[in-house]
Amino acid sequence: MFNQFGDLERCSLRPGNVHSADDWESVLKPVVVRYKGRKVRLYFRGDAAFASPEMYEYLEAEGFLYAIRLPKNQVLQESIAHLLTRPVGRPPNHVLRFYASFSYRAGSWDRKRRVVAKVEWHPGELYPRVGFIVSNLSRPAERVVTFYNQRGKAEQYIKEGKNAIKWTRLSCRKFRDNEVRLQLHALAYNLANFMRTLALPEEVEHWSLTTLREKLVKIGAKVIHHGRYVTFQLAEVAVPRELFQKILGLIDDLRRRPVPA
Protein backbone atom coordinates (compact mmCIF):
# COMPACT_ATOMS: atom_id res chain seq x y z
CA MET A 1 0.00 0.00 0.00
CA PHE A 2 1.45 3.35 -1.12
CA ASN A 3 0.49 6.95 -0.48
CA GLN A 4 0.49 9.70 -3.10
CA PHE A 5 4.17 10.49 -2.42
CA GLY A 6 5.36 6.98 -3.22
CA ASP A 7 5.97 6.03 0.42
CA LEU A 8 5.27 2.40 1.23
CA GLU A 9 2.67 2.52 4.01
CA ARG A 10 2.48 -1.21 4.62
CA CYS A 11 3.19 -4.53 2.90
CA SER A 12 2.63 -8.20 3.62
CA LEU A 13 4.03 -11.44 2.24
CA ARG A 14 1.40 -13.99 1.28
CA PRO A 15 1.63 -17.58 0.12
CA GLY A 16 1.46 -18.04 -3.62
CA ASN A 17 -1.76 -20.06 -3.50
CA VAL A 18 -4.04 -17.39 -1.98
CA HIS A 19 -5.95 -14.44 -3.42
CA SER A 20 -3.98 -11.20 -3.86
CA ALA A 21 -6.35 -9.42 -1.45
CA ASP A 22 -6.31 -12.20 1.12
CA ASP A 23 -6.20 -10.87 4.70
CA TRP A 24 -6.51 -7.27 3.53
CA GLU A 25 -7.59 -6.23 7.03
CA SER A 26 -4.09 -6.75 8.46
CA VAL A 27 -2.66 -4.43 5.81
CA LEU A 28 -5.29 -1.71 5.59
CA LYS A 29 -6.58 -1.33 9.15
CA PRO A 30 -3.26 -0.32 10.80
CA VAL A 31 -2.85 2.39 8.16
CA VAL A 32 -6.38 3.65 8.82
CA VAL A 33 -5.67 3.79 12.56
CA ARG A 34 -2.48 5.74 11.87
CA TYR A 35 -4.34 8.45 9.97
CA LYS A 36 -7.42 8.53 12.19
CA GLY A 37 -7.81 11.87 13.94
CA ARG A 38 -5.87 13.83 11.34
CA LYS A 39 -7.83 16.55 9.61
CA VAL A 40 -7.18 15.28 6.08
CA ARG A 41 -9.36 13.71 3.42
CA LEU A 42 -8.78 10.01 3.03
CA TYR A 43 -8.91 8.35 -0.38
CA PHE A 44 -8.46 4.76 -1.45
CA ARG A 45 -7.72 3.30 -4.87
CA GLY A 46 -7.68 -0.42 -5.50
CA ASP A 47 -7.78 -2.93 -8.30
CA ALA A 48 -10.45 -5.56 -8.85
CA ALA A 49 -8.95 -7.82 -6.17
CA PHE A 50 -10.42 -5.47 -3.53
CA ALA A 51 -13.91 -5.41 -5.05
CA SER A 52 -15.78 -6.97 -2.13
CA PRO A 53 -18.75 -5.75 -0.06
CA GLU A 54 -16.71 -6.06 3.15
CA MET A 55 -14.18 -3.60 1.73
CA TYR A 56 -16.86 -1.09 0.66
CA GLU A 57 -18.60 -1.22 4.02
CA TYR A 58 -15.36 -0.78 5.95
CA LEU A 59 -14.19 2.20 3.86
CA GLU A 60 -17.58 3.89 4.11
CA ALA A 61 -17.67 3.38 7.88
CA GLU A 62 -14.21 4.95 8.21
CA GLY A 63 -15.11 7.96 6.06
CA PHE A 64 -12.97 7.05 3.05
CA LEU A 65 -13.66 8.16 -0.51
CA TYR A 66 -12.79 5.27 -2.78
CA ALA A 67 -12.58 4.12 -6.39
CA ILE A 68 -12.18 0.37 -6.91
CA ARG A 69 -12.11 -1.56 -10.16
CA LEU A 70 -15.19 -3.72 -10.58
CA PRO A 71 -15.12 -6.95 -12.61
CA LYS A 72 -17.60 -6.75 -15.47
CA ASN A 73 -20.65 -8.99 -15.72
CA GLN A 74 -23.73 -9.28 -17.89
CA VAL A 75 -25.83 -6.89 -15.79
CA LEU A 76 -23.19 -4.17 -15.96
CA GLN A 77 -22.78 -4.68 -19.70
CA GLU A 78 -26.52 -4.30 -20.23
CA SER A 79 -26.53 -1.04 -18.26
CA ILE A 80 -24.29 0.57 -20.89
CA ALA A 81 -25.56 -1.30 -23.93
CA HIS A 82 -26.07 2.00 -25.78
CA LEU A 83 -22.30 2.65 -25.61
CA LEU A 84 -21.28 -0.78 -26.87
CA THR A 85 -22.57 -0.20 -30.39
CA ARG A 86 -19.89 0.92 -32.84
CA PRO A 87 -20.23 4.66 -33.59
CA VAL A 88 -21.73 5.49 -36.95
CA GLY A 89 -19.43 6.80 -39.65
CA ARG A 90 -15.84 6.40 -40.71
CA PRO A 91 -13.61 5.14 -37.86
CA PRO A 92 -11.33 7.97 -36.67
CA ASN A 93 -7.58 7.68 -36.21
CA HIS A 94 -7.81 8.47 -32.51
CA VAL A 95 -9.37 6.76 -29.50
CA LEU A 96 -13.01 7.49 -28.80
CA ARG A 97 -13.92 7.52 -25.10
CA PHE A 98 -17.38 7.49 -23.58
CA TYR A 99 -18.37 7.57 -19.92
CA ALA A 100 -21.47 6.57 -17.99
CA SER A 101 -22.59 6.65 -14.38
CA PHE A 102 -25.41 4.60 -12.86
CA SER A 103 -26.55 2.88 -9.66
CA TYR A 104 -25.96 -0.81 -9.25
CA ARG A 105 -26.48 -3.40 -6.54
CA ALA A 106 -24.91 -6.83 -6.67
CA GLY A 107 -26.53 -9.75 -4.91
CA SER A 108 -24.04 -9.64 -2.02
CA TRP A 109 -24.28 -5.87 -1.47
CA ASP A 110 -26.36 -4.33 1.28
CA ARG A 111 -27.43 -1.38 -0.90
CA LYS A 112 -26.98 0.31 -4.24
CA ARG A 113 -23.69 2.00 -5.05
CA ARG A 114 -22.44 4.23 -7.80
CA VAL A 115 -20.71 2.58 -10.75
CA VAL A 116 -18.75 4.51 -13.39
CA ALA A 117 -18.11 2.94 -16.78
CA LYS A 118 -15.52 3.85 -19.40
CA VAL A 119 -15.80 2.63 -22.99
CA GLU A 120 -12.89 3.08 -25.40
CA TRP A 121 -13.01 2.46 -29.14
CA HIS A 122 -9.46 2.04 -30.45
CA PRO A 123 -8.54 2.32 -34.15
CA GLY A 124 -8.28 -1.06 -35.82
CA GLU A 125 -10.08 -2.94 -33.03
CA LEU A 126 -13.46 -4.57 -33.59
CA TYR A 127 -14.69 -4.52 -29.99
CA PRO A 128 -14.46 -1.73 -27.38
CA ARG A 129 -12.43 -1.82 -24.20
CA VAL A 130 -14.78 -1.59 -21.24
CA GLY A 131 -14.00 -0.93 -17.58
CA PHE A 132 -16.15 -0.43 -14.49
CA ILE A 133 -15.34 1.37 -11.24
CA VAL A 134 -17.39 1.32 -8.05
CA SER A 135 -17.00 4.59 -6.15
CA ASN A 136 -18.61 6.89 -3.61
CA LEU A 137 -17.05 9.98 -5.18
CA SER A 138 -19.51 12.65 -6.28
CA ARG A 139 -17.33 14.12 -9.03
CA PRO A 140 -18.19 13.63 -12.74
CA ALA A 141 -17.60 10.21 -14.26
CA GLU A 142 -14.58 11.30 -16.30
CA ARG A 143 -12.88 12.70 -13.20
CA VAL A 144 -13.59 9.51 -11.26
CA VAL A 145 -11.81 7.55 -13.99
CA THR A 146 -8.92 10.02 -13.94
CA PHE A 147 -8.62 9.62 -10.18
CA TYR A 148 -8.61 5.84 -10.46
CA ASN A 149 -6.06 5.83 -13.27
CA GLN A 150 -3.56 7.48 -10.93
CA ARG A 151 -3.35 4.08 -9.28
CA GLY A 152 -0.91 3.28 -12.08
CA LYS A 153 1.71 5.21 -10.11
CA ALA A 154 1.66 2.40 -7.55
CA GLU A 155 2.62 -0.02 -10.31
CA GLN A 156 5.63 2.17 -11.04
CA TYR A 157 6.58 2.19 -7.36
CA ILE A 158 6.37 -1.61 -7.29
CA LYS A 159 8.54 -1.79 -10.38
CA GLU A 160 11.14 0.45 -8.74
CA GLY A 161 11.12 -1.74 -5.66
CA LYS A 162 11.76 -4.80 -7.81
CA ASN A 163 14.53 -3.22 -9.88
CA ALA A 164 16.29 -0.90 -7.44
CA ILE A 165 15.70 -2.57 -4.06
CA LYS A 166 15.37 -6.17 -5.32
CA TRP A 167 12.62 -6.86 -2.81
CA THR A 168 11.51 -9.96 -4.71
CA ARG A 169 14.75 -11.77 -3.80
CA LEU A 170 13.30 -13.78 -0.95
CA SER A 171 15.33 -16.96 -1.07
CA CYS A 172 15.18 -18.07 2.56
CA ARG A 173 13.82 -21.54 3.26
CA LYS A 174 11.32 -20.47 5.92
CA PHE A 175 8.33 -18.26 5.18
CA ARG A 176 8.88 -16.28 8.38
CA ASP A 177 12.44 -15.45 7.37
CA ASN A 178 11.24 -14.18 4.01
CA GLU A 179 8.66 -12.02 5.78
CA VAL A 180 11.46 -10.35 7.72
CA ARG A 181 13.52 -9.86 4.56
CA LEU A 182 10.56 -8.20 2.84
CA GLN A 183 10.15 -5.75 5.73
CA LEU A 184 13.86 -4.90 5.53
CA HIS A 185 13.47 -4.29 1.80
CA ALA A 186 10.46 -2.08 2.56
CA LEU A 187 12.54 -0.04 5.00
CA ALA A 188 15.28 0.36 2.39
CA TYR A 189 12.72 1.46 -0.18
CA ASN A 190 11.26 4.12 2.11
CA LEU A 191 14.71 5.46 3.00
CA ALA A 192 15.51 5.76 -0.71
CA ASN A 193 12.16 7.39 -1.44
CA PHE A 194 12.66 9.88 1.41
CA MET A 195 16.00 10.69 -0.16
CA ARG A 196 14.35 11.26 -3.52
CA THR A 197 11.48 13.42 -2.26
CA LEU A 198 13.33 15.45 0.38
CA ALA A 199 16.97 15.70 -0.70
CA LEU A 200 17.05 16.00 -4.48
CA PRO A 201 17.25 19.38 -6.23
CA GLU A 202 14.59 20.35 -8.76
CA GLU A 203 16.74 19.49 -11.77
CA VAL A 204 16.98 15.81 -10.76
CA GLU A 205 13.79 15.35 -8.72
CA HIS A 206 12.46 13.11 -11.53
CA TRP A 207 15.17 10.49 -10.92
CA SER A 208 13.95 6.96 -10.34
CA LEU A 209 15.30 4.90 -7.46
CA THR A 210 17.39 2.91 -9.95
CA THR A 211 19.01 6.09 -11.26
CA LEU A 212 19.51 7.34 -7.72
CA ARG A 213 21.25 4.11 -6.76
CA GLU A 214 23.50 3.96 -9.82
CA LYS A 215 24.51 7.65 -9.94
CA LEU A 216 24.63 8.62 -6.29
CA VAL A 217 24.90 5.57 -4.03
CA LYS A 218 26.71 2.77 -5.86
CA ILE A 219 29.50 4.80 -7.39
CA GLY A 220 33.24 4.39 -7.09
CA ALA A 221 35.37 6.84 -5.15
CA LYS A 222 39.01 7.22 -4.21
CA VAL A 223 39.65 7.88 -0.53
CA ILE A 224 42.57 10.18 0.31
CA HIS A 225 43.65 10.25 3.96
CA HIS A 226 45.25 13.38 5.40
CA GLY A 227 46.27 14.28 8.88
CA ARG A 228 43.12 16.24 9.71
CA TYR A 229 40.56 15.22 7.10
CA VAL A 230 39.53 12.55 4.60
CA THR A 231 38.81 13.35 0.96
CA PHE A 232 36.50 11.34 -1.29
CA GLN A 233 37.35 11.85 -4.95
CA LEU A 234 34.30 11.14 -7.15
CA ALA A 235 33.98 11.26 -10.91
CA GLU A 236 31.81 14.14 -12.13
CA VAL A 237 30.42 12.06 -15.00
CA ALA A 238 27.46 10.84 -12.94
CA VAL A 239 26.90 13.78 -10.57
CA PRO A 240 28.56 17.18 -11.14
CA ARG A 241 30.24 18.92 -8.24
CA GLU A 242 27.60 21.66 -7.91
CA LEU A 243 24.74 19.14 -7.94
CA PHE A 244 26.46 16.99 -5.32
CA GLN A 245 26.88 20.05 -3.10
CA LYS A 246 23.17 20.84 -3.40
CA ILE A 247 22.25 17.29 -2.41
CA LEU A 248 24.55 17.38 0.62
CA GLY A 249 23.07 20.74 1.59
CA LEU A 250 19.51 19.41 1.43
CA ILE A 251 20.50 16.38 3.49
CA ASP A 252 22.07 18.65 6.09
CA ASP A 253 18.86 20.72 6.27
CA LEU A 254 16.98 17.60 7.36
CA ARG A 255 19.02 17.36 10.56
CA ARG A 256 17.36 18.62 13.72
CA ARG A 257 19.03 21.78 14.94
CA PRO A 258 19.98 22.09 18.63
CA VAL A 259 17.64 24.15 20.75
CA PRO A 260 19.22 27.53 21.65
CA ALA A 261 20.23 27.74 25.27
Image (tube, helix red, strand yellow):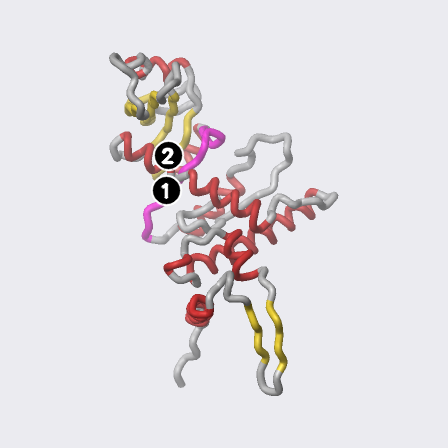
Task: Report the magenta residues as a range.
Answer: 39-51
Give how far across and how far down residue 220 sits, in percent.
60, 64
Label 1 is placed on what type of residue? Tyr
Give the x, y percent position of residue 87. 27, 15
Q: Amino acid at mark 2?
A: Ala
Tell me if 155 is positioned left or right of 123 in this view. Answer: right
Question: Mark 1 or 2 closer to N-term?
Answer: 1
- Which residue is nearer to you in this view: 100 or 201? 201
**Residue situated in front as seen by the camera: 175 or 168:** 168
Tell me the residue that label 1 is attached to.
43
Question: Marks 2 and 1: in contact by CB < 8 Å?
Answer: yes
Residue 183 is covered by the magenta coloring: no
Q: Position of residue 26 (x, y in %)?
A: 53, 42
Q: Which residue is mark 2?
A: 67
**Relative height, residue 159 to residue 122 (above, below):** below
Q: Report the residue at 67% width, 46% height from top.
A: 178
Q: Position of residue 258 (x, y in %)?
A: 43, 79
Task: Name the residue at 51% across, 61% down.
Answer: 238
Q: Residue at x 28, y 23 (%)?
A: 98
Label 2: which secondary element:
strand
